[in-house]
Each structure stands twice: as C-alpha cells, then as structure tokens.
Amino acid sequence: MSTRLTVVSAGAFASVQDRGRVGFRRIGVPWSGALDPNLLAIANALAGNPAGHPAIECFDGGQQFQAEDGPVRVAVAGDARLEIKGTDGPRTAAAWRSHVLEPGETLRIGKMNTGRIAMLAVAGLSIPVAMNSASTYVRAGLGGWHGRALSTGDKLPVDAVGAVPARSLPEPLQYQDAPIRLVLGPQHDHFDATAREAFLGQAYTVSAAADRMGIRLDGAPIRHDPTRGHEIVSDAIVPGAIQVPGNGLPIVLLADAQTAGGYPKIATVITADLPRLAAKRPGEKVCFVTIDAADGELAARALAKTLAEAIASIRLIAGEGVDLDALYQSNLVGGVVDALSPEYITLHA
Amino acid sequence: MTVLPSPRILDLGDAAFTIEFGERIDPLLQSRVRALDLAIGEASLRGRLTGIVETVPTFRSLTVIYDPLVTTRRELTAGIAHILDEAGEAATAEPRHWRLPACYEGEAAPDLAEVAAWIEADTDTVVQLHAGTEYVVYMLGFLPGFPFMGDLPEALQLPRRAEPRVRVPAGSVAIATGLTAIYPWESPGGWHLLGRCPVQLFDPSRADPALLQPGDRVGFFPVGREDYETLSRDLAAGRIDPQRWCERGQARHAGVRR
C-alpha cells in the first residue's frame, strides 16, 4: 500500500499550489501558484522538499489531513494554531517546524492567529503536473487535484521519504505592518490629481470579496477623469495590478486573475508586498504608498535575501527520537556542519 | 516612408512594464506588437536579453514580465529600445490562415435571428457576412485560448447584449462591438451567439495548448447540423487533426517561453 494524505476537511478553502504556471499568459492562462511564495519555500525547506515543490495552501484555517498507510512528514509555514490528533489523544503542535504524522494521525489547522494563509508542505507529495505546474487553476481544470481545489475525501499520494530529523525555523517569518508599496501606472493618467490623492490618502477596508482572484477594497470611491472614462482597450494584467472599474472602488488582482482586462489600472503593488496584502482579512485596513519601479526592484531583492537567510537558519531538532545515522546523513546532504550544539545543528544552504 | 509614433513605456509594478503602441484596436498596432514580440523572443534566445520571464501581446501593447532578481527595468528597456528600432511595423513571418467549421443553425445559433432583425437583413446574409470575412487574431485572453478577433464587417458591429448570459456553451462563435470570438470554455458572456465551432481551442495535452496564436488569420466555413455533430465526434476521438484547417503559413513562436 502506498502512503496517502487524506483530506478529512478542506476548511474554508485549500488548494495545491507551487510557484505557478509561468509562460502561458500570452494564451490567457494565469500563473496561479502560491499567494505567498515565501511561505511555500519555507514550508518545503522544513519538510525536506525542493523549494518549488507543490504544497497545500490553506485559507482561513479549519483544514484536517490524515496520514494513511504510512508515516507522512509535514510542515506548516504560517501563523496558524495546529493540533495533531494521535491515536492516544490530541497534542498541540507548532507551526514553522516539521512533524511526522503516523498512520491514522490527523493534523488539524485551527484558527489563524494572524493572516489568512497557512502553507502545508508534505514530504514527497506527488501531484501530476499540467503545463509545467501543479498549481490549481479551476477555470481550465489545470493542475491541483484533478483540476480542482481540495475537498473532503481526497487521497493525495505521498512518495516514501527516508526518516530524517525534524527541522525548525528559529524565527518565524513576520511581515511588517507598514503601508503597502505600489508603483503608479500603467493607467494612472485616467485619474486626476484629486482622485490620485484620494486613492493614496485613504485607509481602504478589505471587503468580503477577497480570494485568490483578487481583493475588492471598500472605501470612498475615486473618480475617473471624465475625458478618459472608465474603460480601456484591454491590455495585460499582472498580479498586483489595481484596476478601478466604473464604481470607483479598487480591485487588487492576484494569482488567479485573468491575464488581460479593460479597466484602467491606477497602480501595481510591488511583488515584495503582495504576499502580506493577500494575507489581509476582510475588515482589515489597507493603506498604500508609492515608490518607483527601481525601488520596487530593490525591495524584491531585499526580500529574496531575507528569505534566503530564513531558510539558511533552519535547524535540525535533535533529541526527538532521532537516530544519529540519519542525522549525519542529513548533515552530509546539507553540505557544511559548522557547529554541533546539544540542541541544534545549523545547516548552511 | 511613414514615421511611426514611438511607443510609450508604462509602469506595471517592479517586475513588468508595458510597451504601448496606441490606445485603439487596429491591425497595424497588432502587427507592431507582434513584430516586437518576435524580436524580443529571438533576442532572448540569443542571449541578448536576459531575465525576461514572459511577454504578453495584446491588441495594442506588449507587456514584458521580468525577474527583478536577475535584471532591471533600466537594463531591459535599453536593450529593447535597440530592438524596437529594428523591429519596425511589419510582422516578420507569414501568418497562419485558418478556415474553421462553424454551424450557424438551430440551437447552435441562438442569437442569429435577433442579429438579422437588428441589422434588417436575413439570416443567410448574416452568416455570409460573418463566415466570409477573414479576421486577425488580435490577442488571447479573458479565458485560456479565447481569441479576440476582428474586425467584423461594419454591418455586424453591435453593442454587447443588454443582459449577459450566465452560460455560454463551449465552442460558441460570438460577436460584439467590432470583434468576434470562439468561447473555448463554457462561461458567462455578453456577446451575441451566431454559431458553434466544433474545434477544441485549448487542449493542455498539446505542445501548444492554444490552437490559435496572436497574428493568425481566421475565417469560417458553414457546416450543417449533421456535419457539425460528425466533426465534433471525430475531433473528440482524435480521428481529425484540427491542423487540417490551417491552410497556409507557418507557426512561428513569438515571445519568450521558459
């Protein structure tokens, strides 16, 4: 019998995502992919997977997954409360580290302490690739589990993986609660100075219409320049683009949004700030601040550095029934062992 | 020699920018977009441009998406400025010409009578006008593989339906404003449905999942109800390759593919 991870409950929403289906926007296929690629990379590193391995993106908590026919190593990145229901009763479990679910044990992703997204990586999770990606794109039935989001009873195949020590991220990844940075354009000239000031000067509220397609914001409507109107001949959209339809309320487009659109886009959220915007819950406030594209590029590089440092800081947790052979093997895989403390062995990537 | 206006470069965040040739739907703009798309694709292949993730051609603009960890907007726009000078306005490859079957009868054509009444013509005239025109594929979007094609003969240029349909069947051949399209998927839609095309426009198992590419030319030939059913079955069973309806020209892959 091969090992499987059974979806006991898909919670609010759960779907398989990787780094996205890149290269097909020209034929109308959005990237999809993890809303927070940083959580994807960290969860995979903790589970012992390659960085871009498909993982399960869990929205708003409430998901439950059970190991069947074999042990399954899992790791959750995200500020979620976790519980493992073992054969001898429930035990609390921490995010930002790996756990082994023995056959019959269930991982429950409870309430999110902050944010909306918990990324569950599963060592050896085996999902077929469609057009170079396992990311779920329901509209075209691509990727994911049979082209759709996860639902109760799905049994996801897991390739057998060797026993290795648990891994832990010492400092959870935390995003600053600062205004969301954006670059004005491409169609900011459809709005006059007053409208742009109103856009940048107000605190918007995330509406209930916020999902993987995009986030509709509530606030004081902004007016299009009447000489330019509120429609354009369609041009391309990227995740982060903020379109303003006729009602004057902005929509921030995300990973699953269509690839082109006919509303003026007043601005585009920089890639570095998109994950923390996607994590905002309905009712939370959002403020924007402009930067130029070159500073946005610097922010992308700074975040990549932060992520690389976080992944390099992942440690093996000794003393949890770990056998030393596996520990040393893992060190060899990791490359360099520069310190052996009673508790931690640092892996340098 | 006509001097073409220089395109504008528009900001689209920190990992993309849009090269805008104009603000209208126009075959001339589309061919400039396509020429630049091809030229950027070739420059990327030859290593003259690095860090481009993909390019997205639309009616009137080309969006360049790049990896800010590998390159910068400044570097790329400088490189592309050179290419722009070379690319000119003409498409550098002979476009492909398609003649696709379409059934303009019965329940396959729910809006045909209404459109005919609107333009004060009989249904045959509408079919002749629609099928007898060769369209440019301006861009793909809205849905995977959805071709925005134009321009419609002036007589067929109607506004969208006042009440969009919740469900437009897959394969529907539709018109609205100056454009025509084929719905690759069942979806909501506000266009007028003149017929049904049995050819699958999007198939992820094909090397090129989208049948049509920007720049392709597409015409239709009317088929009756029974032929439509037979073609649908033969296509679904793989007994017919849709390439048989591609008459001339060669596929040439524009853009950047990883």
Image: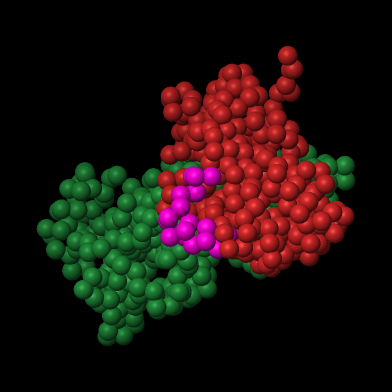
Chain colours: A green, B red
Q: Residue furthest top?
A: B1
Residue at position x 63%, y 49% from top? B221
Nearer to the camera, B162 or A226: B162
- B129 shown above or below B68: below
- A301 shown above or below A326: above
Q: Quadrant of residue B23?
A: top right
Q: Residue furthest bottom?
A: A88
Residue A195 visible to an observer of this rendering: no
Region rendered in magenta? B228-245
Where residue B128 appears, as percent x and y from the top left, is: 73, 48
- A90 shown above or below B177: below
Residue at position x 76%, y 37% from top? B24
Q: How many marks?
A: 0
Residue at position x 68%, y 67% from top? B107
Horizontal placement of A245 versus B257: left or right? Answer: right
Nearer to the camera, A238 or B196: B196
Q: Looking at the rendering, in which quadrant would you find the C terminus of chain A?
A: top left
Nearer to the camera, A321 or A215: A215
Does residue B244 show up magenta in the picture?
yes
Horizontal placement of A222 versus B101: left or right? Answer: right
Where residue A79 appears, as percent x and y from the top left, is: 47, 65
Residue B25 visible to an observer of this rendering: yes
Where residue A309 appears, as percent x and y from the top left, is: 38, 46
Horizontal placement of B176 versus A109: left or right? Answer: right
Where residue A325 appears, as percent x and y from the top left, is: 11, 58
Q: Residue furthest left?
A: A325
Residue at position x 67%, y 40% from top? B134
Q: Looking at the rendering, in which quadrant would you find the N terminus of chain A?
A: bottom left
User: What kind of secondary structure does the magenta stretch mostly adopt?
Assistant: helix
Does residue A295 show up magenta in the picture?
no
